[in-house]
Amino acid sequence: MINVDPLVAGGVPPSHVVEQLQPYMKGYPLCLYCPGDVHRVKKPDIAKLVEEELPSFMGADVVRLVHGAREGAFLALFALYKHHVKERKDKAPFVILDGNTHYSMVLAVERSMLTPVLTEVEESQYRVVPEDFARKIEEIEDSHSKEPLAVIVNYPDGKYGNLPELKRIAKIAKEHNVYVIVDGAYSIGRMPFNMKSFDVDVAIASAHKSMACIGPLGVVGMEESVGRIVTKESEYREGKEVELLGCSARGLPTVCLFFVMPHLKKRVGEWEEKVKLANYFVERAERELGFELRGEKPHRHDLLNFDTSVLYEKFQKEGKDRFFLYRYLKKEGIIGVKPGITKTVKLSTYLLNKEEADFVIETFSKLLA
């Protein structure tokens, strides 16, 4: 089957890694040789993964494993909330999020006892407006006499696959002494990404979305000062980190990430070709199928969101139900388009080669003929 699901495309482990996982699928791996936390385990060498490989891969000073991107956002936000809002009272309890933000980031903010504020998004290509971060920050400074705690930028967003101007937004935030958190669930592991080059404080990755890894597993990269706050140890249980409840993500997904790192380091170097294929697909879909890309052009990511009104109108005229598209594509060997959706279709070309991309276009073309 050809899989075009954006949620799955970047998270499929290579076959050789699946084979390496077999000995770890009996019982609960990693605990036998654990000296107190999974990131200190040396059989296999998870310590090297967390302390050397992932920090180098992400441009982070400190890395911890969690159970997903949203858990990573909560981990950082709640620790920063307690440190700055509750204890020091030197930050206002607000977080500015880009207007395309994923719902889970809003919930992470809410769960951290903070208030989310969303920025504007341009109507034409759904681009995030960097200047609105400054406006929202200044409004909070004026009303609360202190800056908000943080901004969260989805890079890219999970709806349109747009890459916002992260450096510009980070510069605005830093001018106001506001933490910068990046939700890189659809970038880290698919494309080159370095925290230091963007001057951000926290970067959150999703291993099962973009790091060729079984899930659930997330990665949190932090600059040193944030890392000290987040990894603060318990006053009552020596060596146990409070925010991680004494042990970070453990089990088979962690082992999978350990084995997949050489593959990840290689594949991020192929990113330009992935983007080229995505834009080739967009050009054919718009010209031959009458689809319209909802998002920035030229596109800079493999996640594609199309207005497919032509499909909806055809199905309406022919009296077909809204699940017809899903059933038809599956019969033709294509999976990953959400069942029941015909007005807009979100898909990814990440797992495809050119021949497979052509096949997907031709399959849609036959349906519309």
Image (spheres, rainbow, N blue to C red):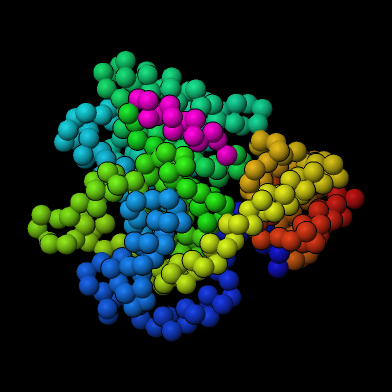
Q: Which residues are magenta?
A: 163-176
Q: Residue furthest top?
A: 142
Is the residue 316 above or below the residue 262 in the image?
above
Q: Is residue 205 magenta?
A: no
Position of 94 compared to 311: left or right?
left
Q: Nearer the viewer, residue 262 or 332?
A: 262
Q: From the top left corner, tell me how far across and down residue 115 is, in percent.
A: 34, 32
Position of 16 compared to 368: left or right?
left
Q: Is residue 166 magenta?
A: yes
Quadrant in which the N terminus is drawn: bottom right
Residue drawn at (32%, 15%), measured in percent from left and top? 142
Q: From the top left corner, tell me how far across and down residue 61 is, in percent.
A: 34, 51
Residue drawn at (22%, 69%), measured in percent from left and top? 36
Is the residue 130 above or below the residue 109 in the image?
above
Mark yes or no: residue 327 visible: no
Is the residue 91 above or below the residue 105 in the image?
above
Residue drawn at (46%, 39%), measured in percent from left and top? 198
Q: From the top left corner, tell me how far across and down residue 12 is, in percent.
A: 57, 65
Count the marks: 0
